[in-house]
Image (cartoon, rainbow, N blue to C red):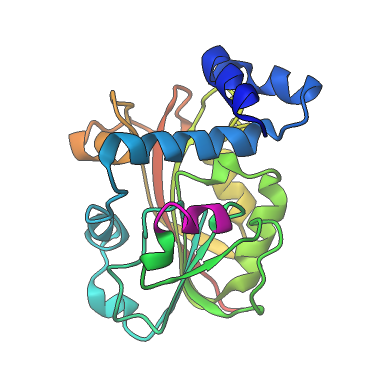
Amino acid sequence: MTNQLTRVLQRIGMTALIVASKVLPIDGKRFGELYYWKSRKRAEGSLLNQHYKAFYTTHFGLTDQDYFGKVVLDIGCGPRGSLVWASMAARRIGLDPLADDYLKLGASQHAMEYLAMPSEHIPLPTSSCDIVCSFNSLDHVDDVDATVHEIKRVTRSGGLFLLLVEVNHEPTACEPHMLTPRGLIESLQPEFSCESLAIYKPSSGGVYEAIGQGQLVPDPLDAKLPGWLSARFHRQAH
């Protein structure tokens, strides 16, 4: 992509990416994701990851011990090093189709693996993961049904799936799916049972800020307004 085209797309903004991608030789969704992370790095200087541990552990009622010796997969991991904290795990894997680009943003320095593959085709054996996570990524994928199928495939019996995702929002260039709480739970059945479910009201920030504010939506299963869903799932025995 030329610098001139990049500047044009930056000026027209993210809301025009879908239209632009239909008439220009670009992948609007890919450009949008990379533009976001490059913008964050410019703003922050370096992409920090200290905040992650609490969301992978205490937020879901887990401790370091629950990760000891485990194979952990983070779907749509981004470039911050989401699993750097989990040194007790046997294997820490970040899956993201933009992983090779993220290495150039500093991810190459992280003590975890990065796999540059889409969630619809996870390059791992069946029943190979103890804990699978998707934080602010499931509504970003190309095919939600195919991704859920792969999550079911790679999670071992007795394993966990930890999910944080925005629900009930209108599709956007980078988040092309409107997911609902009930639809998500039903799509994961019967392989997964839902052990905990909550929806947090939106904040001026993103998912982590909303959880920090702690404003819960009543009756989360049937919630209709936008919010951040948090759910812990247990993989039933095969």
Q: Does the magenta stretch include residue 216?
A: no
Q: Residue furthest left?
A: 213
Q: In this view, does 209 lie above or below 161?
A: above
Q: Nearer the viewer, residue 205 or 148?
A: 205
Q: In this view, does 49 lie to the left or right of 90?
A: left
Q: Residue at x 72, y 32 (%)?
A: 26
112 to the left or right of 154: left
Whether residue 180 appears in this view of the structure is no
Residue found 69% across the figure and 43% down from its top: 142
**Of 220 and 3, the residue lying toward us:** 3
Residue 59 horizontal/vertical position (percent): 26, 55
Residue found farthest to the top: 12
Q: Is residue 102 magenta?
A: yes
Q: Name the spot of residue 19 as percent of width and height, x first.
A: 71, 17
Bounds of the magenta segment: 100-106
- Figure quadrant of residue 171: top right
Quadrant (top left, top right, bottom left, bottom right) of the N terminus:
top right
Quadrant of the snapshot with the C terminus: bottom right
User: 104 or 64: nearer the eye?
Assistant: 104
**How many discs mark residues in the rendered view?**
0
Compared to residue 157, the image places residue 85 above or below, namely above
Q: In which quarter of the image is residue 64?
A: bottom left
Residue 177 placement (x, y as % from top left): 62, 33
Residue at (47%, 31%) from the top-left corner?
A: 222
- Compared across the picture, whether 120 is left or right of 233 comes to right
Q: Where is residue 96 in the image (x, y as percent from the top left)?
A: 56, 56
Residue 228 visible to the viewer:
yes
